[in-house]
Amino acid sequence: MNGEVSAATSFWSLAVFFGCAVAVSGLMILVSYVLGEKHSGRTTGEPYESGMPPTGAARTPFTAKYYIVAMLFVIFDVEALFIYAWAVALRGLGWPGYTEAVVFIGILLAALVYLSRMGALDWGTSRKGTGSGTGG
């Protein structure tokens, strides 16, 4: 038992930590309630959008394009982190690491070309069928 921590001691420290976290959170809420502004003017309950009066409903549905672009951003952002980690360890990896990075970037470029051809990156309407009507 000379240097070991018993289970009761570890649970006790966890309970103290949890109690302190709850106490600090409650104290912060109480202080913000006491020191916060207490007024109710004519426009207190209205949404603030950069000084402009709001237009339209706040629950406007977005098209799937926004979500697709967000997912693509996250995916390619994570790959940028992998490339950064590779660049940091470049000297230790040598030529095999360089070859693997080139293959990795090639796969990313192939995926980007595929997404572009599938139309995942197109924002506007399709130009097919939107001629001027004077074709010949």
Image: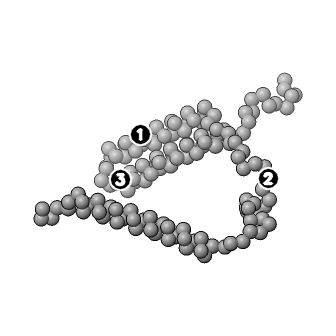
Give the left or right position of residue 30, taking residue 44 as reference: left
Q: For numbered disc 1, what is the local secondary structure?
A: helix
Residue 24 vertical position relative to residue 115 in the rendered view, above or below = below
Q: For numbered disc 3, what is the local secondary structure?
A: helix
- Residue underneath mark 1: 103
Please provide percent x and percent y for residue 95: 33, 46
Please provide percent x and percent y for residue 37: 66, 73
Who's the residue at 87% across and 28% down the image? 134
* Nearest the eye: 4 or 136: 4
Q: Residue furthest top?
A: 136
Looking at the rendered structure, the kind of residue marked 1 is Val
* Nearest the eye: 40 or 133: 40
Q: Marks 3 and 2: which is nearer the front?
A: 2
Please provide percent x and percent y for residue 129: 78, 28
* Nearest the eye: 128 or 23: 23
**Gap in Å between the C-alphas at discs 3 and 1?**
15 Å
Please provide percent x and percent y for residue 58: 72, 50
**Gap in Å between the C-alphas at discs 1 and 2?**
49 Å
- The tag on residue 90 is 3
Cβ atoms under marks 1 and 2 closer than 8 Å:
no
Looking at the rendered structure, the kind of residue marked 3 is Leu
